[in-house]
Amino acid sequence: MNDWPEGWSDDNRGPRYGRGSGGAQPEGARAMRHVQRGPAVPPGQRSYGAPGPSAPPYGAGVPQQPSYSDGQGYDGYDSGYNTGQVYGGGRGGGFVPNDNDSDPEVDRYRPRPNWRRRIKWAVLTLVTVLIVTSVATYFWADSKLRREVDLSKVIDRPESGQGTNYLIVGSDSREGMSKADEKKLHTGSAEGKRTDSMMILHVGDNGDTLISLPRDSNVTIPTFRGSTSGKIRPAMGQNKLNAAYAFDGPTLLVRTIEYNTGLHIDHYCEIGFQGFASIVDAVGGVDITIDKAFKDKYSGADFKAGKQTLNGEQALAFVRTRHAFAASDLQRTKNQQKFLSALAHQVATPSTVLNPFKFYPTMGAGLDSLIVDKDMSLWDLASMFWAMKGVSGGDGKSLNMPVSGSTGGNLVWDKAKMKTLVDELKNDQPVTVSGN
């Protein structure tokens, strides 16, 4: 009788491992089946044991099951106990992250900020903003300049010397003023334009010089080309200097000054009553020290002695007053020089230039009211104001045109002193002449 289960007899059981043997000889050594880990899986991919697009046999998220192989080779053998990867991840076991799971260690340790790189980009951004703003401001300001005077119409001009000569004119133009403005500023309502002040500003390497030309100066008005007709007009003989402007405007004024002095005028700049007052108000007033108290009902002036801040209305009264002084025209030109230098100094201060709420209104008020020659650039205009600031700061010299006497109520220039002065300016030499 066979004691073994069906299909298992002494004849067919053979010398199998683990099932005993009926032979007289003991079983020989046999190879154990070992855990064989599969090939390495690239990062970010799942491995399910069998290649191909088929679905994972154990479901998503379940690690590949070990395969078993017989044989004596040990290549690729890994018990799994050395690395802790048998039953879970190496971060503490039990959790195998999916592809879309965030890495807690990356979230926990953020990289330190690169301050050098941040500072570099901040500086580059700031420089870019400054460049763009500067370029935009330049073109905005340049478009507002009123280039209305054509100096090419001036005939028989003297040769240019060294340095640059600006003719700065303050006119009594009421352009843009209402009746209320005329009353407030005590300007009256006269038609047309006349020159209230005329100055030559020489900008050179040996100091800047500001020379006032009294409007009552006795001069010869020579032949000239009409600014409108273009025709040559005959000389008008002896007259007051401001009559030249009244007859034919800026070009005849330039022609008359060049003819009587021999000095070449490079640029022309004019401002009227309204524009002058607007610039002073836009800059927030101008600080000035008045040496002696005075009043003038014609200009509206009423000033005490001492340091004070003048607004637009007061500033206009200050530079126009002449009836309060014995030497009316000469004292007025001194006051004009003093105030214009103080105004240029105020405009050029960091508190104005670096403050956009003051800088742009001041620029707008000035550029809207300035009338210049066709060749005047913003750089020329800036040079003019900077030179006036230098004169007020003691880096230059200011004087009246030397006068030797008067005739018929008009002031006569001292020709000898004037020639010396003009020669020094032409050669850009330090000025040694003193005025009245």
Image (cartoon, rainbow, N blue to C red):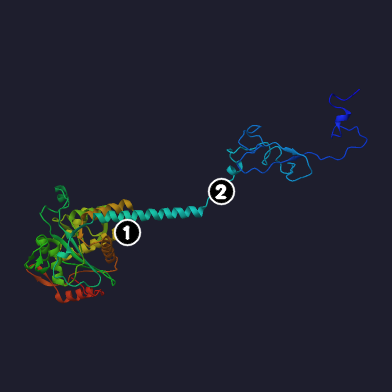
Q: Amino acid at mark 2?
A: Pro
Give the residue at x 71% y 39%.
Answer: 86
Q: Which mark is residue 111?
A: 2
Across and down, in percent, residue 328 comes to 14, 64
Across and down, in percent, residue 162 comes to 24, 72
**Is the residue 271 above or below the residue 399 in the image?**
above
Observer-side mark, 1 or 2, equals 2
Q: Amino acid at mark 1?
A: Thr
Quarter holding the N terminus? top right
Specify whether 413 is left or right of 280: left
Q: Which residue of the protein is positioned furthest toward the right in this rendering?
A: 24
Across and down, in percent, residue 433 comes to 21, 74
Residue 9 visible in rendering: yes
Looking at the image, is mark 1 or mark 2 earlier in the sequence?
Answer: 2
Mark pair 1, 2: CA separation: 46 Å
**Is the residue 11 above or below the residue 47 in the image?**
above
Residue 214 visible in rendering: no
* Closer-to-camera residue (95/282): 95
**Is the residue 39 above or below the residue 293 in the image?**
above
* Residue designated by label 1: 349
Give the residue at x 14% y 75%.
Answer: 415
Rate crowding at label 1 as few (under 14), some (14 to 19) or many (20 or more) other CA atoms within 10 Å: few
